[in-house]
Structure formats: structure tokens, C-alpha cells
């Protein structure tokens, strides 16, 4: 049965309610981040960038951790359920978006506080590698083949990324420790958060976490539909070829 | 507000790209859902 | 056949293919040398070249490695040899170790050429201890590169469009090798006043990398290449 137009979405009452909550939280976050909260003693108004920058990188870390967990669950689980792979893929895609956002907002913030868009500090450099690694992971997901092939390949790549990222981070840290020029400031360490500022940051983390859940629910359903439709397309192609062969 | 352009730019960039992605996901979901049956959508 | 003899047979086969076709000797090594000459054009200063020679040697190695890895799997997927081995129930870890070993031999030969080129073209002058350290660095880095190259090369082998995926997957992973090998080679060459003793921690990093990806590759190679 084809769903009626009203049902032809990836939304449910639950996601709609969650979406409404996210919208309200986002409005509160913008108001609080841009107007209500005070300026920082040292950083002045630039601290306002933190309220979107820190939650973005937080979501990215959470998303990549979830990708790793789901990939591990796919590989180790007896059922080998492709659902794990779909969640892993959806999560990685959202993570790539948020890590890109946090790299851009971070470099804007850096321009204001350090005077340059980019410094070769260990954390920044490994974050850039994190981004490239998961762009590669998403490319692996698009290699084609059956769903099981995709699931196996991408889960192995995701688990290898778990090995790679600490190695890259560690070696970049070693690399920087020899080159330590003018002390590259840790932007968070210089910020003395008062009550409302801390509240705004926490609100940002909560909002972005809810946003992540909403995006993840929708995206993994879209992947399921994409897989189903692609699968049916293949079946139809095979069937029509069979008909052609039978007609001859 | 000092440095308003940078601050506004980072907010616009963050929420703009997230909104664009969310809109893409929802619209793609609708387009795909039209080609699927209800049984293929376990959440309905 | 046990794992070791399969691995040896695979490695020997790959090296025999190279001995017959001489692609590395006739194409990849000249390519690497051209890259070294191009670096000299781009940087255009003897002092700078001498200072950055170690980094250039390893960059040229990585670029050449991409070509060698693609070559290593192109000969397999051209006639479905890898699939045939897997269908025959050959241990994937043995295939992985064998192909890695062959890749390491080829990469090491390339690195020798590149270090000689740096000696001649860029005017680096290591001490005896420096040469020894450079040798150990090359061994440690090559083992790591051979493992990751084979691991990701196996994934990127086969279907069309995958060749372009290899650099995207491989280069971020080998960043620790580039960092470690460059610093260790700087110490060995005395670039920028570095002393030989400064290089050993970096060689340790290279060794850790090699061990981790050797172990991970033996496990992961099978699922990655399985079609």
C-alpha cells in the first residue's frame, strides 16, 4: 500500500515534537548567546562565538563516537544487522557537517583572538585530520555493491579510524611540542565564565545534542528508504531483463 | 557589539548550514517516501 | 600451506611481476626523481633545500607509494586473482602479509634512490652515525607504509572510480609516518642543526605505527577485500 501524502515523510509525532523543542531551544540559544549573556573580561564579545563553536565540535565528537560504536556493533554482533550500519553512516555524515562548521567558526574566532585564521596547534591539526578521515569514510560508503558489502567495508574503515585518530593526534602533539613558538592559547582556558555565560554554553550543548538526535533519526530513515528504493530499482531492472529474454 | 561581523557570520554560518542540511534531509525523505510502501517504513 | 609459506609465495609472485614488467624501475623511480627536481625548482634556494631535504624525500616517497600501491592491486584485480585466492580459501592475513612484504621491498628500493638523490641534488652530508640512523628510519617507516598501503590499497582496488579514493584514504592515515620519518631523517641528516640522538624517539613512533597497522591489517584485510 502506498502511503498517503500525509504519511510520506520520515517524520513521526515524536520527531515533530522533538523538532519543536529544538526550534525553541535554538531561539533561546541565539537570544542568550547574542544579547542576554555578558561579554567576557578578556575576550570581550568574541566569546559569543564559543556558544556555537563548542557545541558543534561536541556534536561532531559524539557523532564519530556513535559511528565507531555502531560499526563495532555491526562487526561483533551475531545478527549483522544493516541497521547498525545505517546509523553509523547517518551519524558520520552529521559529524562531518558539524566538524566543518566548528573548523570555520573556530578559525573566525581564532582570527579575532589570535590574529590568524589558523595556527598549527595540535588540536586544530588533528581536528582537520578528523574531518578528512570521515570525508574518506563517507566516500567509502558510496563505493557501491550490496548493502552487506557496504556495511562490512565501512564498518572496518570506521574501526580503523578509531586506531588512526589517536595516532595522528599523538604524533601531531609530539610534532608541535618541538616547535612551540609563542604560546598558542587554549581559547577555553582564558575564559572565565559567569553564571549566565555558563548557562548559555550548557544550553548550547543541550540544544545541539537534541538537534543531533533529530537529524540522526531523520537521516537514518532516509538511508533506509534510499536502500529500499535502490534495491527495488535493481529488482525491477532484473525483472525487465528477464521479460525481454522471455519475449525473445 | 565589537567584531559584530565575525560573530554574526559564525552564527549565520552555523545555523545556515545546519538548516540547509536539515531541509535537504527532510525533502529527500519525502521524495523517497513517495516511492516506498508503508511496510517499508517501520516508523509509520 | 601454512600462513608463512602462503605469504612468501604471494610476496615472491608480486616481486616476480615487478621483475618482469620493471614498472618501478622504468616508471616510478624516474617519477620520484622528477618530483625531487621539481621541488628544487619550486624552492629555488640551496640553503632551504638542504634544510627541508628530509621532508621532501618522504613526500616524494608517499606520492610514489600511491602509484606503487595502485600498481600492486591493479595486477591482482585485472584477472580476478585476488578473488580466486579468496575463493580458494587462502588465509587473507597471509595474502596481506605477503603483499605488504613485496610492497615494502619496492618502497625501500625507492627510498634508497630518493635519499641518494637528496645527497647528490640537495647537498645533505650526514655523518656515519647519521647514515645508520637514516637506514633504521627507512626500515621502520617502510614497514608501516607497506602495511597501511596494502590495507587501504586492497579496499581501493577493483571497481572503477576507486583509484581516486586511495589518496584520500591513505594520506591522512600516513601523516604520522610523514611526521616521524621526516623528524628522524632531519636528525640523521643534521638538518637545521639537529643532532643524531634527537631522531630515536621518532623512530619509536614509526615502530609503534608499524606494529599497530601490521596487527590491524592482518585482521581487517579479509573483510575489506571480500566481495
Image (spheres, coloured by chain):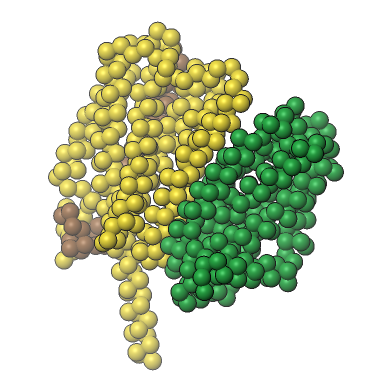
Chain colours: A yellow, B brown, C green
Residue A188: quarter of image: top left
Residue B17 can be seen in this image: no
Report the quarter where the N terminus of chain A lies. bottom left
Total numbered badges shown on the rendered structure: 0
Residue C214 can be seen in this image: yes
- Give the residue drawn at x 59%, y 59%: C100
- Give the residue drawn at x 49%, y 53%: C215
Residue C71 rendering spot, x and y as whole percentages: 64, 63
Residue C10 rendering spot, x and y as whole percentages: 59, 69
Of C190 and C175, the residue lying toward us: C190
Residue C140 rendering spot, x and y as whole percentages: 63, 47
Q: Is residue A132 left or right of residue C29?
A: left
Residue C189: quarter of image: top right
Q: Is residue A108 left or right of residue C104?
A: left
Residue B41 rendering spot, x and y as whole percentages: 20, 58
Q: Residue furthest bottom?
A: A248
Give above or below for A148 relative to A56: below
- Give the residue drawn at x 30%, y 64%: A229
Of A33 and A163, the residue lying toward us: A163
Report the quarter where the C terminus of chain A lies. bottom left
Q: Is residue A81 left or right of residue C145?
A: left
- Give the residue drawn at x 38%, y 87%: A245
Give above or below for C160 relative to A29: below
Amino acid at each position: 500500500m502506498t502511503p498517503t501524502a500525509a504519511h510520506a515523510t520520515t517524520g513521526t509525532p515524536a520527531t515533530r515534537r522533538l523538532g519543536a523543542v529544538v526550534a525553541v531551544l535554538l531561539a533561546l540559544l541565539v537570544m542568550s548567546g547574542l544579547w542576554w549573556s555578558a561579554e567576557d573580561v578578556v575576550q570581550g564579545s568574541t566569546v559569543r562565538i564559543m556558544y556555537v563553536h563548542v557545541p558543534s565540535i561536541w556534536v561532531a565528537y559524539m557523532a564519530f563516537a556513535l559511528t565507531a560504536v555502531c560499526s563495532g556493533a555491526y562487526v561483533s554482533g551475531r545478527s549483522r544487522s544493516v541497521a547498525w550500519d545505517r546509523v553509523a553512516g547517518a551519524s558520520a555524515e552529521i559529524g562531518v557537517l558539524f566538524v566543518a562548521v566548528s573548523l570555520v567558526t573556530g578559525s573566525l574566532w581564532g582570527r579575532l583572538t589570535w590574529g590568524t585564521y589558523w595556527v598549527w596547534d595540535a588540536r586544530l591539526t588533528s581536528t582537520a585530520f578528523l574531518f578528512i578521515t570521515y570525508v574518506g569514510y563517507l566516500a567509502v560508503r558510496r563505493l557501491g555493491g550490496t548493502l552487506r558489502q557496504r556495511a562490512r567495508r565501512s564498518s572496518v574503515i570506521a574501526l580503523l579510524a578509531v586506531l588512526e585518530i589517536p595516532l595522528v593526534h599523538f604524533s601531531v602533539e609530539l610534532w608541535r611540542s618541538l616547535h612551540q613558538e609563542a604560546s598558542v592559547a587554549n581559547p577555553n582556558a582564558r575564559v572565565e565564565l559567569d553564571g549566565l555565560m555558563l548557562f548559555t554554553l550548557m544550553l548550547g550543548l543541550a540544544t545541539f545534542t537534541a538537534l543531533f538526535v533529530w537529524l540522526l533519526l531523520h537521516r537514518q530513515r532516509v538511508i533506509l528508504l534510499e536502500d529500499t528504493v535502490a534495491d527495488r530499482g535493481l529488482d525491477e531492472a532484473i525483472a525487465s531483463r528477464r521479460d525481454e529474454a522471455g519475449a525473445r | 557589539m565589537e567584531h559584530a561581523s565575525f560573530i554574526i557570520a559564525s552564527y549565520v554560518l552555523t545555523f545556515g548550514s545546519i538548516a540547509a542540511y536539515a531541509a535537504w534531509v527532510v525533502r529527500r525523505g519525502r521524495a523517497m517516501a513517495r516511492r516506498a510502501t508503508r511496510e517499508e517504513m517501520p516508523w509509520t | 600451506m601454512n600462513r608463512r609459506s602462503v605469504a612468501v609465495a604471494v610476496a615472491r609472485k608480486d616481486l616476480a611481476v615487478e621483475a618482469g614488467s620493471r614498472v618501478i624501475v622504468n616508471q616510478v623511480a624516474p617519477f620520484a626523481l622528477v618530483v625531487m627536481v621539481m621541488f628544487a625548482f619550486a624552492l629555488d634556494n640551496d640553503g632551504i633545500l638542504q634544510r627541508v631535504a628530509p621532508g621532501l624525500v618522504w613526500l616524494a616517497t608517499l606520492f610514489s607509494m600511491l602509484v606503487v600501491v595502485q600498481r600492486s592491486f591493479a595486477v591482482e584485480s585485472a584477472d580476478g586473482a585476488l578473488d580466486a585466492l579468496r575463493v580458494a580459501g587462502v588465509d587473507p592475513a597471509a595474502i596481506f602479509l605477503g603483499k605488504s612484504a613485496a610492497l615494502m621491498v619496492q618502497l625501500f628500493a625507492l627510498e634508497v634512490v630518493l635519499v641518494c638523490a637528496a645527497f647528490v641534488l640537495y647537498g645533505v652530508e650526514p655523518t656515519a652515525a647519521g647514515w645508520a640512523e637514516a637506514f633504521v628510519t627507512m626500515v621502520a617507516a617502510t614497514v608501516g607504509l607497506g602495511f597501511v598501503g596494502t590495507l587501504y590499497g586492497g579496499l581501493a582496488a577493483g571497481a572503477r572510480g576507486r583509484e581516486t579514493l586511495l589518496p584520500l584514504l591513505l594520506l591522512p592515515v600516513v601523516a604520522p609516518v610523514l611526521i616521524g620519518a621526516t623528524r628522524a631523517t632531519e636528525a640523521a641528516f643534521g638538518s637545521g642543526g639537529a643532532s643524531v640522538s634527537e631522531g630515536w624517539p621518532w623512530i619509536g613512533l614509526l615502530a609503534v605505527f608499524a606494529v599497530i597497522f601490521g596487527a590491524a591489517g592482518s585482521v581487517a584485510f579479509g573483510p575489506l577485500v571480500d566481495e
